[in-house]
């Protein structure tokens, strides 16, 4: 069982300790442009899968995209905690915006 935090840590470790035959290593070696190309390809595959009926295919493609996004985050030096913090801040902002909208609708 591997959650997103654990996968992020493993990718971080691949960056610090390159391992022969590792696909993550291959991406880091190729560099940012290659990682961005993969994120673009995987995003398109998620869109195509979302239009089809197969949940399994959709889950597979979202997982591919999630992995490549984590590789991109490590390459850019951004942590999962930074994303969590941003989302947590939005939670406060969004509920304030909703309160304002509710008041305007009264
Ligand atoms: N979650 C993933 C994961 N998801 C997708 N992929 C790889 O992403 C690639 C996507 O397939 P494509 O056909 O688009 O790409 P490709 O033809 O293989 O290669 P490209 O030349 O196009 O880049 C496949 O090679 C998959 O193996 C992943 N590779 C590794 N992980 C995890 O990352 C961790 C470290 O893996 P290694 O770095 O390989 O040790 C492990 O926990 C793995 O499970």
Image (cartoon, grey):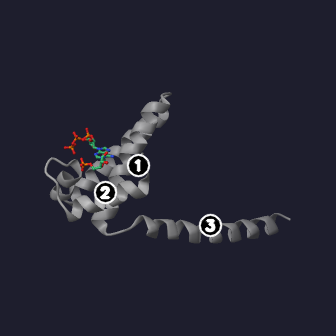
Q: Which residue is mark 1?
A: 2
Q: Position of residue 61 (x, y in %)?
A: 39, 39
* Mark closer to the chain start, 2 or 3: 2
Q: Position of residue 56 (x, y in %)?
A: 45, 31
> How far is disc 3 from disc 1 in space, using C-alphas?
26 Å
Give the label, 3 or 1, closer to the camera: 1
Q: Which residue is mark 3?
A: 91
Q: Residue furthest right?
A: 106
Q: Residue furthest left?
A: 20
Q: Which residue is mark 2?
A: 10
Query: Do the numbered discs 1 and 2 sit on residues whose CB atoms are within 8 Å?
Result: yes
* Mark closer to the chain start, 3 or 1: 1
Q: Position of residue 1 (x, y in %)?
A: 42, 45
> Dot 2 lies on which element?
helix
> How far is disc 2 from disc 3 in space, using C-alphas?
29 Å
Kindly identify the residue that appears in the image at 86 percent across and 65 percent down: 106
Question: Which residue occupies the foreground of this view, 58 or 97?
Answer: 58
Crowd class of label 1 (few under 14; some 14 to 19; many from 20; radius 10 Å): few
Task: Confirm or reject: label 2 Cβ below 8 Å from ligand 1.
Answer: yes
Kindly identify the residue that appears in the image at 22 percent across and 65 percent down: 16
């Amino acid at each position: 069982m591997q959650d997103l935090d654990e996968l992020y840590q493993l990718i971080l470790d691949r960056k610090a300790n390159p391992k022969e035959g590792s696909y993550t290593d291959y991406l880091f070696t190729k560099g940012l442009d290659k990682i961005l190309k993969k994120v673009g390809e995987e995003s398109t595959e998620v869109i195509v899968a979302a239009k089809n009926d197969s949940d399994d295919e959709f889950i597979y493609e979202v997982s591919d995209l999630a992995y490549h996004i984590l590789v991109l985050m490590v390459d850019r030096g951004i942590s999962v905690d930074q994303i969590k913090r941003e989302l947590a801040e939005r939670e406060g902002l969004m509920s304030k915006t909703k309160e304002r909208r509710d008041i305007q609708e009264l």
